[in-house]
Image (tube, rainbow, N blue to C red):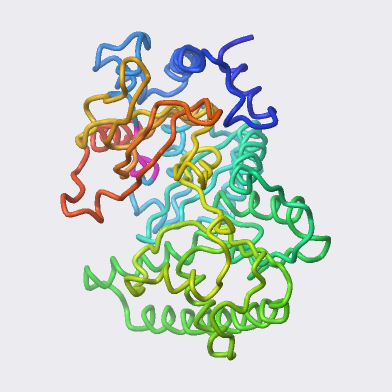
Amino acid sequence: MSAIDQIKALVDSNDPYREAPANLRELQLEAVRERFAEKRQQLKILDRRATEAGITEISSLQDLVPLLFTHTNYKSYPETFVDKGQWGHMNTWLQTLTGKPVTGVNLEGIRDADDWLDRLKNAGHHVFASSGTSGKCSFLDQTEEDVALASKAYMKGFLGQWAPRKPEHDRPSFVFFPPTGVHRLCIHNHKFFTEFVAPEGEAHFISNEPLRATPGIRAGQLRRALAAGTALPEEIAAFEAENEKNAKQAGVRFNAFVDKIHSKLGQPICLGVMWPAAFQLMEALKARGVKDGEFHPDSMFQMGGGIKGVVLPDDFKEQIHRFFGVKPENYLNSYAMVEMTGLNPFVQHLNAYALPPWIVPLILDKSAEQLLNPADGKGEVEGRFAFFDLLTDARWGGLISGDKVVVDFDSADGFTGPLVRSIARYQDLEEGEDKLTCAGTIDSYVRGAINL
């Protein structure tokens, strides 16, 4: 059995966070070697980067550092491709970042990015998109096997959040996320809450409308047109009217959802919610007369996400904790990003996030040029978080994040992988974020490869 297959098999273990083999570091390195040998043949930009860096094989994790991509590489397509509906060109761009041939995609009558994603899926490319809050989405490909492995990995991550207790189909659940859509978490959230947490018919989602990529893209297009002075008055008026209509519909859905939650106040429930929505929910319930501590004390809160530019009070988390009034261990959390398969669940008694065995942590200096992982695999290291995702087959699994972390490489309490003890975004810190040379390098390879 190959090292990759051994890593994949760990997804089916009862607890992959604790049941990885003692030789995990060696197994991960061999799996990375296998992935590199395979993907170098499939991804021209990876091969070009490896050739320029003089890397013919992965003899140590340091060899991976020059080969890592960044999240911006997955939104490196020229905006005009989407603006002008040049979906054939978008296929050419996607081909630079996926190892599976982008062929057999029906391009007839595509109206927008969501149609394009549907056509790709019909051709075997299960592409998901980032939230696109900047107006430009990242698009990341998955094979059918990637999707199946991801489903198992996310379920193990969710269950890891709940540990040592287990969800038992015993509480109405309210998820501030639609059950379908372009975001990677949609289908996994739906599966977990319906199959593990809620009784039949008691998994409620704030909307059954699929989460789409197009609204964020259109907002970005208008912002660019306004900045360039090319936006027509009728375009602005139409966009504002559509926004007003959508805001009203969202308000109606939100209030109906709050009423459902309010009706279950006296019994244990589970909320799947991000911090800004939790604060909004708190304010709406207060307006309905709910006081601090009125929630059932055995309610569970599956929290997550940043505040993504939403303006909230400095003490918003303290206000939320005081209002809902449940024990700290009833707040479940994880460290995750869409480019990574699965979740790193927060372990309450260790005050840290546990990494699964298919994620190889690579702690770098701020400039992302030097690997800081301890040679002996022991001790704590602070630096920029990068990783190699061994479950990802459609794409190259190496990625650099914008996070500054402290990682403890010592095993603790049965966890076989490292633990992430501190997380902050460089852009939110006084030292700020730097442009990464590697991101521009890979983007230049993409531009050269599409050659349009």
Q: How many marks?
A: 0
> Along the line of sight, which residue is nearer the eye, 343 or 381?
381
Q: Quadrant of the N terminus?
A: top right
Magenta segment: 69-74
Vertical order, 354 against 245 (above or below)? above
> Along the line of sight, which residue is nearer the eye, 415 or 30?
415
Asked if residue 246 lies left or right of residue 97, the reply is right
> Along the line of sight, which residue is nearer the eye, 62 or 394?
62
Can the viewer see residue 131 in this picture? yes
Asked if residue 336 lies left or right of residue 407, the reply is right
Residue at the (51%, 13%) spot, across then down:
23
Residue 157 percent across, percent down from the top left = 59, 42
Can the viewer see residue 393 in this picture? no
Residue 384 percent across, percent down from the top left = 28, 37
Q: Quadrant of residue 105?
A: top right
Q: Is 21 in the magenta?
A: no
The chief SS type of the magenta part is helix
Q: Quadrant of the C terminus?
A: top left
